[in-house]
Amino acid sequence: MNINLNYKKSKDNYLFVEINERVKKFRQTHSDLHILNLGVGDVTLPMDKKLVKVMTDALNDQATEKFKGYPPETGYDFLKTAICRYYKKLGVDISNEDVFVSNGAGCDVGNILNLFSFSTAVIADPTYPAYYDSNILCGNEVILLPLTKQNGYKMVIDGLEEKSYLIYICSPNNPTGATMTHDDLKKWVDFANKTSSIILFDNAYQSFIEDHCPKSIYLVEGAKTCAIEIASFSKSAGFTNLRCGYTIVPKELQREGQSLNAMWNKRQCTFFNGVPYHIQKGAEFALSDEGEKICQKNINYYKQNAKILKSCFKGMQFLSSSNSPYIWLKIPAKFTSWQYFEYLLNEYNIVCVPGSGFGKFGEGYVRFSAFAKREDILLAKQRLAT
Amino acid sequence: MNINLNYKKSKDNYLFVEINERVKKFRQTHSDLHILNLGVGDVTLPMDKKLVKVMTDALNDQATEKFKGYPPETGYDFLKTAICRYYKKLGVDISNEDVFVSNGAGCDVGNILNLFSFSTAVIADPTYPAYYDSNILCGNEVILLPLTKQNGYKMVIDGLEEKSYLIYICSPNNPTGATMTHDDLKKWVDFANKTSSIILFDNAYQSFIEDHCPKSIYLVEGAKTCAIEIASFSKSAGFTNLRCGYTIVPKELQREGQSLNAMWNKRQCTFFNGVPYHIQKGAEFALSDEGEKICQKNINYYKQNAKILKSCFKGMQFLSSSNSPYIWLKIPAKFTSWQYFEYLLNEYNIVCVPGSGFGKFGEGYVRFSAFAKREDILLAKQRLAT
């Protein structure tokens, strides 16, 4: 038995733990203040009553003759069919066998690494921390591509050696909010096919896209032979607590004579036991025409929040595409990210996320999240105006 | 990017898929027959109404101001506290920080391998297939220890070189039903401490133990410095569909200067996003005094099933400890396991699991499960008597 020594190499990255501790400490000496949390990227609106009823009805069945045991490891066919139907409406043809229902995109993003060994990952800097951390824990090399004002806060290929990589693309991006156009993605798809790389496309924020940017990487020609798409009901349907997502591994995706689809199927059937029936019934409803309308209402609410937030930063430099719930604010040069975090907390009692928590190139920025309650967004606006 | 070539080495082990296909084929030509499934180890009784109500109430909160977002990665404190209280009643002192709530023991059994690299696993033959398959997929070596009539169908150390291993112990055992006594476990704990091995103790069937065999490995002196215990609400509270289990990694467990507790905490915070609130509320209720009584009723029902089943095999050689929902039947020498499976299916319209599906030393046996409905067990008895 040998310990996985990569755990030694990995630094503790408890960004949100650190934020919570600083806020807690501040609260201890300022218990009278209403602190506005515009930090964490977690939804706050209650779920729709009908959506919840679909799930409680199905859960109630567990106390009846309709009782269900182990769910199928890769998802019930009714949900896979609903997912395929949703993609069909986007203009993408996939089949039930390409779809693997899971307990969330966050889990799949890490677990997918079991299919690879001794690989080099290409990851944006700043980035969603789990991409980086999971690769370090699995002993992979990491190449960080800076997201800067010059490249529009998007990963660009320039200068990347033509080798076979695991390429992480999150679009709309967390934390910068930048969204890849069809042309942006086409360049990466062509690069991946040429170099036998694999793109891991994190689509967690697709439901916020309102312009012509692709809502699936499979809208880009050639993607099915190089890309795995990981998606979630967390942000679109408010499922962060309920845990349901899915990963698409097209049967066309082969490497070294192996079908990645067959490999992921084996991984999930060995290491995973499926998602509860009632949760999958809820996810199915969220994808129905009625459910989509219901979910869109919440998304519009968060988008309106983002607009209000943006109006607070007039005269400052920030990135907020209309496709993203995040605002990526360039802070005055005299502050580090953590200093600005402390400044906002102390002066305005507002919590943001220091950009440096997402990587070296996040220094000089902070991230605001529009996933807050409207009243908190309006209060933040009032405070920042004074 | 390199493919994990261990996937090539791993054979397809779709034991239950194969069984289902054979049954399906039989059904096609015998659609009039009532086939009794005494194969799969999945619970069949509806859950208690009150237990379900606890969960639907908590789920209904998601449509109100009590809405909850991301659950804590390692579990809500209320459930950890309930688990510690349960262990306290068994006579084991653990603290909330030792407990990691998860979406099921089956997942943890596989995912725990992320903490190790290039290790040698010691696994019983016959075995629950996931132990073997997950180790092959992670590139580990496997040493199989035969479970035979001679050793009481329990893993024994005799002849095992004194090296550092990952040692899988499932007690009560799946598939044989044999249960480790305190003395049996003490030998393994001493061996593990002496050789710096780690015991992965799969406790999925602990609630079936009715004699003096330990319901936790931590009842054995020295276990906290060598053992990880993986447990589940699947069989005790009928949670196979709802997905909730937990893993105990004592803070005392260190290897190569690393705290396994800290490593598993990092693994879960990076690769996992927690279990839904309402499911954890249900698990908490299952551990309450009232919940325990309710769950015990179902367990007694399955135990009674096992007794009835045993009475069918008078004169045949079988193992069924009173601690197990499984019966491990020695079949007549003229049959292979699969031949006996076909014989039972064709002659009696009863489905069992061929022992060879659990490993080479399972050949010559079949497994019956008591997790069926009483009426099916009684019908099986009638048919087998004729």
Image (spheres, coloured by chain):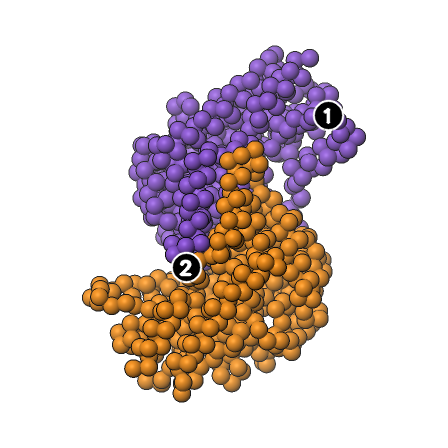
Chain colours: A purple, B orange
Which quarter of the image is occupied by the C terminus of chain B?
bottom left
User: x%, y% of residue B298?
Assistant: 49, 64
Q: Is residue B25 left or right of residue A59?
A: left
Point 49% across, 56% down: residue? B48
Q: Secondary structure at mark 2?
A: helix
Q: Please tell me the numbered disc located at residue B68.
A: none
Which quadrant of the figure has residue A310?
top right
- Of discs 2 and 1, which sits in the foreground? 1
Q: Secondary structure at mark 1?
A: loop
The answer to whether residue A181 is above or below residue B142 is: above
Rate crowding at label 1 as few (under 14), some (14 to 19) or many (20 or more) other CA atoms within 10 Å. Answer: few
User: x%, y% of residue B252?
Assistant: 72, 60
| Chain under disc 2 | B
**How far apart in space, not on screen, are marks 2 and 1 (Cα)?**
60 Å
Residue B321 versus residue A143: which sits nearer the camera? B321
| Chain under disc 1 | A
Q: Is residue B54 visible?
A: yes
Q: Amino acid at mark 2?
A: Lys
Q: Amino acid at mark 1?
A: Leu
The answer to whether residue A384 is above or below residue B8 is: above
Q: Please tell me the numbered disc located at residue A33.
A: 1
Q: Which residue is mark 2?
A: B8
The answer to whether residue B198 is above or below residue A45 is: below
Residue A125 versus residue B48: which sits nearer the camera? B48
Point 52% across, 53% down: residue? B51
User: x%, y% of residue A87?
Assistant: 34, 36
User: x%, y% of residue B32?
Assistant: 22, 66
Count the marks: how many? 2
